[in-house]
């Protein structure tokens, strides 16, 4: 994998896990490909994504479960079958200590394929709208604020509080939208917000220097990245000094290159 970059392909993502999880992720990948043969593979929100006329489904590996993200409609359409699993509006968690329901996943993926195909056909049948004059490109600050505005109402306060802590760590840091979320860099990319989970904030530290830092906040067994979770802004504020220490150590490692 290239140095100083986050994963760019599913192969790179899956290769970062130990064998038991890696095998499950590969089987899930193959299941989705079979159910959606026309879909393409990519990385979006930092996790494997299948696209077909837009995002189709996402999945990801975690310490105790496999995350599957078929959009809110995919969850709603199979809410009875998914009732036994933990999840949120657009996601479900399949525990690693129980069999993964690949047959159910196949049906959900086919449902999403049909849904996206119908949307694409409807779009084609609609008369093309007059071309709009290109608008001025938004600034980094405007793009970040636009991202925050689209997050769940209950999460905005927590997200902004965590952004404030990160930006206060060093005047060297810059904030922008990259990988579809607020991302922070100093000469090189350092960390990015991950997908928001109910009552949980996620930061992805993807600069390789993070693997040399020892901290109780850092989680994960990946080759060149670590994860930090906070339940809310109160927990983030409680661990503010340690979070800032991690950021500054990475910035110092960048300066020493």
Image: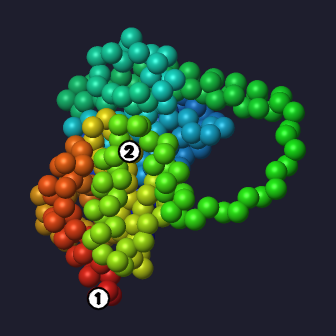
- Decide which of 3, 167 is in the foreground and name it: 167
Percent position of residue 193, x then y:
37, 54
Residue in the picture at 83% in, 30% down: 126
Residue holding disc 1:
256
Percent position of residue 19, x then y:
26, 47
Give left or right: position of 118 versus 42: right
| 214 shown above or below 251 | above
| 31 shown above or below 193 | above
Q: Quadrant of the C terminus?
A: bottom left
Q: CA distance from mark 2 to mark 1?
A: 36 Å
Give left or right: position of 195 versus 56: left
| 72 shown above or below 252 | above
Q: Which mark is residue 156?
A: 2
Residue at the limit of the structure toward the bottom, as seen here = 256
Residue in the picture at 60% in, 34% down: 37
Percent position of residue 147, x then y:
49, 50
Say which quarter of the image contains residue 133: bottom right
In this rendering, does residue 112 appear at all?
Answer: yes
């Amino acid at each position: 994998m290239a140095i100083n970059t986050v994963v760019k392909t599913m192969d790179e993502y899956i290769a970062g896990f130990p064998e038991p999880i890696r095998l499950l992720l590969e089987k899930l990948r193959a299941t989705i490909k079979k159910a959606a043969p026309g879909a393409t593979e990519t990385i979006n929100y930092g996790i494997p994504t299948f696209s077909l006329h837009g995002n189709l489904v996402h999945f990801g590996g975690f310490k105790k479960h496999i995350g599957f993200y078929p959009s809110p409609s995919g969850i709603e359409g199979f809410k009875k079958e998914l009732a036994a699993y933990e999840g949120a509006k657009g996601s479900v968690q399949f525990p690693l200590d129980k069999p993964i329901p690949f047959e159910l996943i196949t049906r959900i993926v086919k449902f999403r394929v049909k849904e996206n195909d119908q949307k694409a056909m409807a779009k084609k049948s609609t008369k093309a709208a007059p071309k709009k004059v290109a608008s001025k490109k938004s600034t980094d600050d405007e793009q970040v604020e636009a991202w925050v505005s689209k997050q769940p109402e209950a999460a905005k306060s927590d997200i902004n509080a965590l952004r404030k802590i990160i930006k206060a760590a060093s005047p060297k840091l810059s904030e922008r939208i990259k990988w579809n979320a607020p991302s922070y860099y100093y000469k090189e990319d350092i960390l990015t917000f991950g997908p928001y989970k109910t009552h949980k904030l996620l930061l992805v530290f993807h600069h390789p220097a993070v693997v040399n830092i020892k901290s109780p906040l850092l989680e994960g067994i990946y080759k060149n990245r670590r994860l930090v979770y906070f339940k809310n802004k109160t927990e983030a504020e409680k661990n503010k000094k340690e979070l800032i220490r991690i950021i500054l150590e990475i910035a110092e490692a960048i300066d020493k290159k």
